[in-house]
Image: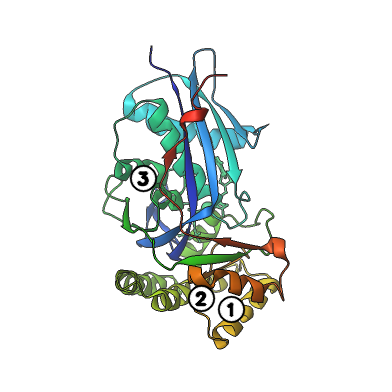
Amino acid sequence: MQKRIGACRAHTNIALIKYWGKRDQTLFLPTSSSLSLTLNAFYTDTRVQWLDNLSNDLFYLNGEKQSKEETNKISRFLDLFRDELGINGYAKVESYNHVPTAAGLASSASAFAALAGACRESLHLDWSNEKLSTFARRGSGSATRSVYGGFVEWNKGTSSVDSKAIAIDDANWDVGMVIIAINKAKKKVSSREGMQLTVATSPFYSQWVEQSEQDLIAIKEAIANQDIQRVGEIAETNAMRMHATTLAANPPFTYFEPETLQAIASVQALREKGFTAYYTIDAGPNVKVLCKASEMSQIKQHLSETFTNDQLITTTPGDALTRLDHWEYED
Ligand code: ADP
Ligand code: DP6
Ligand code: CO
């Protein structure tokens, strides 16, 4: 009998053109297309094992058995595969985050890309990464893009089968990022709740969608030209426009903390010193600084005047989803 176990590693990604809102909550269809950079420093390893003696799915995160609520999220995701393939049975899912969980550092992106990949391996599916990205999407929108390395576009598509990611550029040129981890604690408003409230109540929302479409066209051209300054300029304004929509929501909210503004000021100061450095911020207080890989350590050095060394993480672009052969044995 074929073994029914599979394991994968997926890296997180940081959106440069943000996904911020769904047009279909169940199918995870976004209101606009988005574009990201996969990061080498942060990733999730996940193993899926289908076992005969189970009467429900099991989920372990970082070695700890998870609550019913968290396990249910995994079960809903496994249902997508069970339904598609017409199979029964339960699985033990074990996952390790090499990224803080739910802190605005995109753990849901690497998590569901790794889980989708481990499902593909454990069920011996002959699926392309494009198809797999449509399944990752149903776990968390940002996971659609973590199937690939480098710069990745998630095309909003017209339906569940064509709302998928494609690789745009391997980012194997002078591209780097310095992460300023301001607060690694779990955020109060999840991305899911935050975007839903914004879509429903922010009067700025429709303008955000329109502007984002223009930004996407412009950033793709800048990437094709390997023009990191232009990529940074577009990413920075796109991020701030996303955050502006939350301030206008009802009730209003923000993911910014006092140190977020301090980090923004530090990036502006870096530019005044002549560095190519632009910030982007996801649904959390942490700031990510897009820069040239060749200037990354100098930039870190300057930022260490304001932030502690363990708050500063440098990274180069990350790779696509990979299989973890050595973890695919039954214990
Ligand atoms: P983040 O900014 O980290 O992506 P989100 O609010 O989008 O924050 O998603 C966090 C949620 O993703 C967690 O509460 C959990 O439900 C899920 N998650 C995170 N890591 C994993 C993992 N390794 N396996 C499965 N689900 C995970
Ligand atoms: C601000 O993918 O975490 O990071 O689809 O509801 O799971 P769900 O949300 P999630 O949202 C990410 C929002 C963002 C922007 C982005 O990654 O594009
Ligand atoms: Co997320």
The location of residue 301, given as percent across then percent down, is: 65, 73
Q: Which mark is residue 278?
A: 2
The location of residue 123, given as percent across then percent down, is: 38, 25
Give the alpha-carbon distance from disc 2 to disc 1, as whole Å.
7 Å
Tell me the element at label 3: helix
The numbered mark, 2 or 1, whose residue comes first in the sequence reads: 1
Residue depth check, mark 3 versus mark 1: number of the one nearer the observer:
1
Q: Nearer the viewer, residue 62 or 247?
A: 62
Q: Nearer the viewer, residue 251 or 29?
A: 29
Amino acid under disc 1: Val
Tell me the element at label 2: strand
From this view, report whether residue 174 is shown above or below residue 58.
below
Q: Crowdedness of circle 2 by 10 Å Cα count: few (<14), some, many (20+)?
A: many
Q: Are marks 2 and 1 in contact (CB under 8 Å)?
A: yes
Left or right: 213 as drawn, with respect to 21: left
Q: Which mark is residue 91?
A: none
Q: Nearer the viewer, residue 165 or 213?
A: 165
Write down the residue under mark 3.
133
Amino acid under disc 2: Tyr
Residue that protrudes farthest toward the bottom in the picture: 272
